[in-house]
Amino acid sequence: MVERKSPTKTAFLDNPAVSRDDINKMIDNINIKKGMNKSLVFETERDKVLIMLCYISGGRISEVINLKGKHFKFNRPQSSNYLIDSFPNLKNKKNPDKIIPIPKNDKFAEPIRSYVEKYVKDREHYLFFHVEKRNGKPFIATRNIYRDYAVYKHDSKLNKKIRVGSKKELIMAKGQLSVLRHRPMTRQMGWAIIKKHCGNDYWPHIFRHFRLSHLGKSLTERQLITISGHRTSLNLESYIRLNPNVFEGDIIPVD
């Protein structure tokens, strides 16, 4: 694996992109272990898919954590791609969203689909939603939690509603993970996840560079702009960082 420099702006230009195999190995090392509780299983699956999407979408971390169920188009039997539709493009006001294809035969395609279908039941829910923590750990209910609601009845003599009792409603079952699905995780949390699994030499934005560098070998300049969400090709100069070994075999000798 290519040794990387610290995550500074200069390092973007100094480091060639690692190979796709290296990225696959990083993600393959994030495994569900025997005996993990529901919370840890969820976190493991979430972390893997977050890193996959940081790479495969070529998106910024702020864009990735704002993805919702409604952005994914999986029911496309006649197409060779799944789609991330209306993907937020936060730094281009002229084109505020973009469409990102995910090839169905890509290694990351089915894990992403499985995660969305398993955990994102509502189109308006975030993929990477906020998880409530207490004492630094995800909060899992140790008992059934109920909320009391007052019950009122109209009194015709007094001509007003009077309270006649109360009822309980189950709001959280024992063993349930406390989450806020209408609120995304923070950028800082995204950074922490990538550092936890990939080490201090990697950070969310570098996966955007890796993806654009890998696509740079096969896509046109206009196609790369569409994927990256840039206004012009000027920014691509700092994004496309190929290791010479990648294209050495494509160089045709000149007599």
Image (cartoon, grey):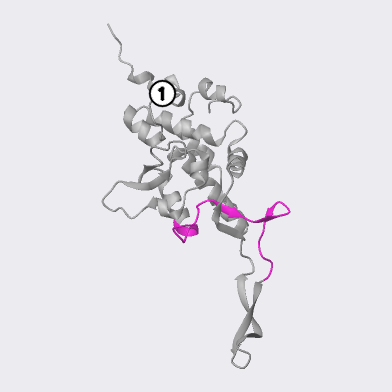
Query: 204 or 195: which is nearer to us?
Result: 204
Relative to 216, residue 255 above or below? above
Q: Toward the viewer: 140 or 41? A: 140
**Is-magenta flag for residue 156?**
no
Q: Is residue 140 visible?
A: yes
Regarding mark 1 in the picture, which secondary structure is present there?
Answer: loop
For the point 30% across and 15% down, the residue is 252
Residue 226 coordinates in the image, percent (x, y):
36, 35
Give amino acid for label 1: Leu
Residue sitting farthest toward the bottom: 157
Q: Which residues are magenta?
A: 117-143
Work out whether residue 103 or residue 72 is closer to the camera in this orientation and state it.
Answer: 72
- The answer to whether residue 218 is visible is no
Horizontal and vertical percent for residue 207?
50, 34
- The x and y percentages for residue 163 are 65, 84
Q: Residue at x 61, y 35 (%)?
A: 199
Q: Check disc 1: other Cα within 10 Å, few if <14, some if 14-19, many if 20+.
A: few
Q: Is residue 59 left or right of residue 198?
A: left
Which quarter of the rendered picture does the C terminus lie within? top left
Magenta stretch secondary structure, dominant: loop
Residue 132 part of the magenta segment: yes
- Rendering quarter of residue 229: top left
Residue sitting farthest toward the right = 135
Residue annotated with mark 1: 234
